[in-house]
Amino acid sequence: MTKLLDGRPPAERIRAAIAAEAHARAARGAPLGLAIVRGGGDRAVLSYSRLVARLCEQVEIRAAFVELAPDASVASLSEQISALNRDASVHGILVTLPLPPPLTVRDVAGVLAPEKDVDGIHPVSAGRLLLGEETFLPATAAAVLELLRAYEVPLQGKHAVVIGRSNIAGKPAALLLLGEHATVTICHTRTVALPAITRQADILVVAAGQPELVRRDWVKPGAVVVDVGTNWVHGRQVGDVCFAEVEAVAAALTPVPGGVGPLTNMLLLRNVVQAAARQ
Ligand code: NAD
């Protein structure tokens, strides 16, 4: 029977550690602060930013929304982010994506202070990750590794296959697995004969954004499968892995929801604690 890689217990341990640190700082009059920059009225952005603010409140991190005008220019975005860079009460800056067009993540990266880049989107953060140096990791990718560590999944020498090459999930997850001495294959939309590759995986990480893409015959019996996907299908959240089929073959599998997701949010907040420690 497959083992459930439940993200909630490790997320709760991290939450408790963050809460203790944040409380200690608040008690000495130096609370942790996170600025959440948002704009454009995208529904997913609104609900995600509200969720992050609520989690911050629960652990005594001061979250403040910074609203971008619907017609915000690169110059006004730069001005707002520069002000946050200078504000000593703001330890981390989260820019929720997508931004109102034509603004892109590149416009943010050009101005955001790397020491406040708690979402790991700055080229300096990405470069440090590539070099294997300590940095702010994109929380989603960090959550994949945190989950594998929490359940003591051996990585060294294992074949890890990652589906997805986005800058926030697939690519950084692949680099982190490489850092743990796994042999890593990255797959994407142009990969030929994908199931033949995934069937070779000891560890399969799926971050494709395609509901139930991975079927039973894509998975080697005894593999560990981490499903990053969060897709809404007929009002129900489903992953990128067909849970009902894959649980019959995988040694361990993440539920969706309740796997990678809870850890992702906590690791973002842990980056705020780490940012404050470094400032
Ligand atoms: P993205 O769209 O930016 O990237 C998807 C990647 O998957 C691309 O590199 C693409 O080449 C690849 N891909 C897509 N369809 C494929 C297919 N049929 N075969 C092979 N490769 C394919 O998405 P993202 O931002 O990396 O997010 C991926 C998924 O993870 C989404 O479902 C998203 O909602 C979810 N997500 C979850 C969390 C969490 O905390 N659980 C956080 C962020 C994103």
Image: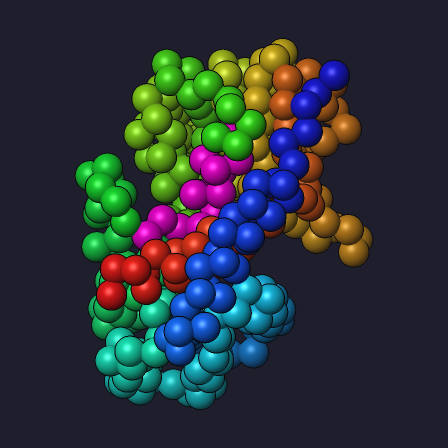
139 is higher (above) or lower (below) than 157: below
Direction from residue 175 to residue 248 in the image, left or right = right
Percent position of residue 270, x then y: 43, 55
Q: Quadrant of the C terminus?
A: bottom left
Q: Residue furthest top?
A: 221
Say whether residue 11 is magenta.
no
Q: In the figure, residue 1 lies in which quadrant?
A: top right
Q: Using the rendered image of the protein, determine whether residue 80 is visible from the camera's viewpoint.
A: yes
- The reply to whether the magenta stretch includes residue 146 is yes
Depth check: give the residue in front, 182 or 15.
15
Horizontal arrangement in the rendering, residue 39 relative to residue 244 (left or right): left
Front-lying residue, 268 or 9: 9
The range drawn in magenta is 136-148
Q: Is residue 120 above or below residue 254?
A: below
Going 56% across and 32% down the picture, which residue do you hit?
A: 226
Write the residue at 77% across / 28% down. 244
Quadrant hosting residue 87: bottom left
- The image quarter containing residue 25 is bottom left
Using residue 171 as the reference point, say whether residue 251 is left or right of it: right
Residue at left offset 34%, top offset 78%: 89
Q: Residue at x 34, y 69 (%)?
A: 91
